[in-house]
Structures are given as structure tokens and as C-alpha cells.
């Protein structure tokens, strides 16, 4: 089975912190856990404040299906208000190589 990574980078709206972003994700975390092909999720914050949200999927198709639901089914999530939408860079890419 293949693996794909959903990688999203962005800045937060002024006045919000990484901790605020993580707290606002409870409903998104619950949604992701219910999605077919979900493997894991990691959220990082760089020294310059850039947030990177990485989600591992069984396939690119699983990631795309879930991402669509986050923008439709989960459109009312409080997480959306924490993100500077103009700064978002989103992609889902297949994994070419991994070691364990």
C-alpha cells in the first residue's frame, strides 16, 4: 500500500498562538480519526511562527477526500478563524521513499 502526506503551511491571524491553533482543532482531530486511510497527524511551529500541519494517509485519494470535507462538512470549525487564509500553502503528495 502506498502512503501520502498532506502538508499545509500557513501563518496564524494576529493575536493567535500555536497553542490557540492546537486547541481549536479538537473537532478536526475527531473528524480525521473517522476518515478512511488516516494514519497520523503532526503540527509544528517554526521560530518565525509558520505552522506546518502534516497528515499521513494511505493514499493521495484518501487525503483529497478528507481535505474536501474539512472545507465543507467542517466549514464551521473554529480552527478556520485562527488561520491567515492568504498565507496557506496546501499539497498532498505521494511518499517516494521511507525508512523505519
Image (cartoon, helix red, strand yellow):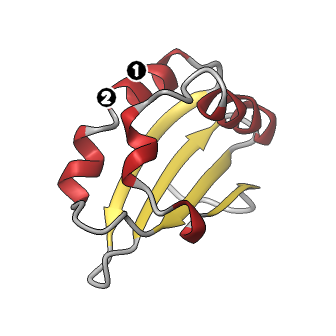
Image x and y of residue 83, in percent: 43, 56
Q: What element carries label 1?
A: helix
Q: How crowded is mark 1: few (under 14 residues within 10 Å), some or many (20 or more)?
A: few
What is the number of the mark on residue 14? none
- The picture quadrant where one finds residue 52 is bottom left
Quadrant in the picture for the N terminus: top right
| Whole-percent x, y for residue 54 in the image | 50, 53
Residue 21 in percent (x, y) is at 29, 50
Q: Give left or right: position of 33 versus 86.
A: left
User: Image height check: is 91 above or below 21?
Assistant: below
Direction from residue 4 to residue 80 in the image, left or right: left
Q: Please tell me which residue lies in front, 3 or 79.
A: 79
Nearer-the-camera pick, 29 or 71: 71
Going 63% across and 51% down the picture, which residue do you hit? 5
Residue at 77% of width from left, 42% of height from top?
60
Q: Residues within 10 Å of mark 2 (few under 14, many from 20)?
A: some
Contact check, label 1 and label 2, Cβ < 8 Å: yes
Q: In this view, does 99 lie above or below 49?
A: above
Which numbered marker is on residue 30?
Answer: 1
- Comparing 5 with 90, the one in front is 90
**Residue 26 numbered tag:** 2
| Up/down of 51 relative to 95, above or below | below
Judged left or right of residue 47, residue 7 is right
| Residue under the image location 26 percent in, 83 percent down | 47
Tell me the element at label 2.
helix
Position in image of residue 58 (x %, y %): 68, 34
Q: Residue furthest right?
A: 61
Amino acid at each position: 500500500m502506498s502512503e501520502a502526506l498532506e502538508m499545509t503551511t500557513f501563518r496564524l491571524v494576529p493575536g493567535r498562538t500555536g497553542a490557540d491553533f492546537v486547541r481549536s482543532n479538537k473537532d478536526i482531530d475527531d473528524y480525521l480519526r473517522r476518515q478512511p486511510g488516516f494514519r497520523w497527524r503532526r503540527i509544528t511551529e517554526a521560530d518565525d511562527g509558520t505552522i506546518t500541519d502534516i497528515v499521513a494517509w494511505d493514499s493521495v485519494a484518501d487525503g483529497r477526500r478528507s481535505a474536501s470535507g474539512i472545507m465543507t462538512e467542517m466549514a464551521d470549525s473554529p480552527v478556520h478563524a485562527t488561520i491567515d487564509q492568504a498565507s496557506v500553502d496546501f499539497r498532498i503528495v505521494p511518499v517516494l521513499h521511507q525508512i523505519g
